[in-house]
Amino acid sequence: MSDFLTSLVAVVAVLGFMILIHEFGHYAVAKWLGVRVEQFAIGFGKRLIGFRKGETDYRINALPLGGYVKMAGENPMDERTGDSGEFLSHPRWHRFLIAIAGPAMNILLAIVLLTLVYAVHYEYPAVYDEPTVVGWVFKDTPAAKAGFQIGDRITRIDGIANPTWKDVTMKEDLSPGQPLDVVVDRNGQLLEKTVVPEAAGVDQIGQAGWAPNESKVIITDLTSDMPAEKAGLKEGDEIVALDGKPLPAIAAMIESLESTKDKPVTLTVLRDGKTLNFTVQPVLIEKRYRIGVGSMPMKTKTLALGDAFRLSLHENRQNAMLILELVKKMAERKISMRSIEGPIRIGQAAGEAARSKGWTPLMELTAAISLNLGIFNLLPIPILDGGVILFLIIEGLMRRDISLAIKERVYQAAFVFLVLFAVMVIYNDLMKTIPGLADRLP
């Protein structure tokens, strides 16, 4: 199967499952509370296939852009009969439970999926267990200008004490153009510094210009048909020297290649206890000289179910806070809207996960998408579940319904906003995906 078809099948399966779970949450709680469900739909527009059971039409529609559960009497502009099966005939707390059930199901699914992954195959970068010691500082970067040095141990960043490299990376990514207060331990002396990560890449995320300390530079990723593979290098090789000089970090090689450009380089590696030398010819790809190697050693654990569940709760809580911080910073225009991934980029990620070894990469991606979908739907935007919840809270405090005229205008404005938002996300996706177009993004 081609990469495109793999990506298409994977993204349809993942997003279809997410939508099904979300809408089932609304459906199950509505039925439990006695609300009559007229349609349970995946997609919008014209009905393609389906079946009717009891009072509900279960259907798949022509436009695969989401889904919905249509309940009797849920539209405040429709004529109400007072039937107990109508949505608006139920008390506000019933309607609140129905509205929140969809996002809650997505968040619950994310917790369950990560629990299963961690209980079977918990894999993470080995550097996350290592002290946050700087192993390399790129020249002319914010970190270099702020005075960071190789060997500095980051003891605090933006209020987080004793951070892991995961904490450091998240703060760095979310702070393009924004000052980060950092405390480092340099030979026992605590130094306070401020670094302003620069926006980089097509996603315009922050980069400070430092890299973690690596005790060994081991090739964990070898790109096919690239110079390193053609020269005979293999995954598992430990690179000990570049052009005869010790290699302290893969970042040092990246910076060196920018200086030597297309000049052949000699890599000295350890393989099965033997020292081997390889001559590699770098190539220019996307404005950078590369040889096609990556070094990200991973650790693998199998956790007890209770430990896996607790870790899943921690990771999902941390990721949820990260999503909310990203939304807040985008609203404040502190981070580019280009950091948002749309359906095209999600499809690419799903295809890569589906082609990876084992089932856990796709499960982890599904959990991440499910959590994002749950959090996004809880945002207080009319039309979304969060908007419905907001209206219910306001009406509860007012002890009366908001007028239909106001609701209609708010929903119209929200609809226009969501359409424009979707257009922008898809446009960004196209610019990031189609070669040569990324540089046209503002």
Image: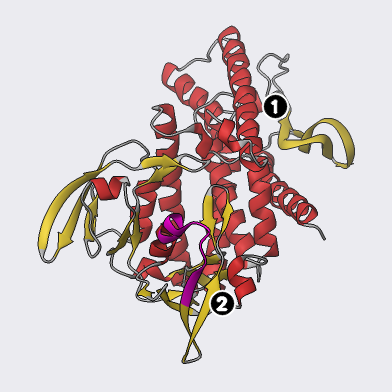
Q: Position of residue 112 (x, y in %)?
A: 56, 60
Q: Position of residue 413 (x, y in %)?
A: 59, 15
Name the front one of labels 2 and 1: 2
Which of the 4 quarters of the picture holds residue 150? bottom left
Q: Position of residue 411 (x, y in %)?
A: 60, 17
Task: Specify start and end residues of the magenta stretch as a single range.
Answer: 256-267
Relative to 268, is 80 above or below?
above
* Numbered disc 1: secondary structure: loop
* Numbered disc 2: secondary structure: loop
**Left or right of 45: which side holds 267?**
left
Dot label at residue 86: 1
Q: Position of residue 356 (x, y in %)?
A: 66, 66
The answer to whether residue 108 is magenta is no
**Left or right of 79: which side holds 400?**
left
Q: Which amino acid type corresponds to the residue marked 2 in the rendered image?
A: Glu
Q: Nearer the viewer, residue 320 or 94?
A: 320
Which of the 4 quarters of the picture holds residue 176? top left
Dot label at residue 235: 2
Q: Which amino acid type corresponds to the residue marked 1 in the rendered image?
A: Glu
